[in-house]
Amino acid sequence: MSKLITNIESLVTCSADHALYKTGAEMQNIGEINKGAILFGEQIEWVGTADEAVQMMKSASYTPEEIIDASGKTVFPGFVDSHTHIVFAGNRSGEFARRLRGVSYQEIAAEGGGILTTVKGTRAASIEELADTGRGLALSAMKHGTTSIEIKSGYGLTLKSELNQLRAIKMLKEELPLHISSTFLGAHDFPPEYKNKHSKYVDIVCNEMIPAVAAEDLAEYCDVFIDKGYYTLDEGRKILETGIKYGLKPRVHCDELADTNSSALAAELGAASADHLLFVSDSSIEAMKKAGTVATMMPGTAYFIRMPYAPARKIIDSGAIAALATDCNPGSSFTENMQLVLSLAVINMKMTAEEALNASTLNGAYALGLSDKRGSLEVGKQADFVVANVSSYTDLFYHFGINHVEETWIGGIKI
């Protein structure tokens, strides 16, 4: 039986008439219906106004199993957080305190800290311990309105530990109600034992890790951190092309610390997304636009490590596909709250509220290959949505720093 939520003060559908994403001026349209209503089971069955819902029930002599009054509330699609690292072990608050005293992220990494600090903790953790951390963050993300999430490995940097991270992600996939996409990121950094033997570690990633990940069907994507001080374009190409060979679609950490043309490489290889983009060039933006590679921006990272923000206005105005994600991780963006990401995007990246909503729902879903089923409130799509205790979607941005989410629904079930 179906449920009807009606008298919704602000129903934000992010509808694109079943298009898979929005770009440019289309991102200003969020398909808002005032005094709206939505009929759903596991999937969305009907969307319209509250008055139309009354007429529909009269003409069909039909009463839903449950009618929910959402007067004074806002309903919008669940957030799709398309870039996270929430399965890990260890704590880096001490490094954060050092950064507050002026030590840079790069300086800490050069000392053997940063990602490698988390590597030590993750290697020592069991699969169950890794899953415990991810579970807690995923449940919190759901409470803040996230209904689909991507999770990467990348804190093991050995065959055993990378597989353990991915197995922990698989446990969460089987247990939690939100949709989880998994990504192999064995090329997140170089492990300390291969500090001066980069080519040998790249061979291990290509010849041992990727085949093992594919054999267990543990990931959908392969990612590489191509940036200054990390993987080169040639190393990244070799790893990503190997991933493609084994059925792992590419997505790439790009141009976060410097302009390395890695976003252009992501576009060339048909990557689902190029992520970070703090120093992306105009030519790389154009390449992403032509290739249909999603430009995923994570303002929480720029905020957390005091770096310049990605050029959102330039990316959106170019016509490239723009998405927003948390980059939730223990070192450079420790938040699972997409509402905070939206606030940072509109204030510090000059996005409009409407652009931010489309970027964090429909376009985020497209970055994960999900936008035919999720990311907007349209008939036939999964009933993944949020009920917020505000009378307008603009209040999500206006009253910042709190959790506005009252209910999160996934697959038509309130969690």
Image: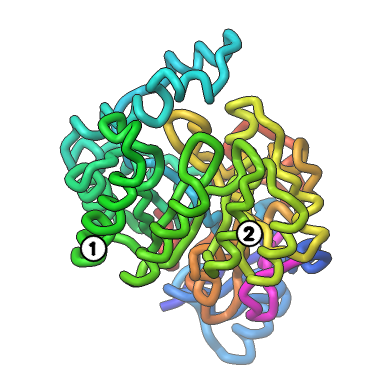
The N terminus, quarter of image: bottom left
Stretch of the chain drawn in magenta: 10-23
Q: List the residue tagged with mark 1.
A: 211
Residue 344, placed above or below residue 165:
above
Q: Please give the residue where the numbered disc 2 appears in the rendered image.
A: 264
Q: Is residue 257 visible?
A: yes
Q: Residues within 10 Å of mark 1 (few under 14, many from 20)?
A: some
Asked which secondary structure carries label 2, the reply is helix
Element assignment for label 1: helix
Q: Amino acid at mark 2?
A: Ala
Q: Sequence-wise, which precedes: disc 2 or disc 1?
A: 1
Query: Residue 358: image x %, image y %?
Result: 68, 60
Q: Residue 334 appears at what percent x and percent y? A: 48, 31
Amino acid at dot 1: Pro
Q: Position of residue 218 (x, y in %)?
A: 26, 60
- Seen from the viewer's position, the closer of residues 378 and 371 is 371
In-image side of 409 versus 159 (left or right)? right
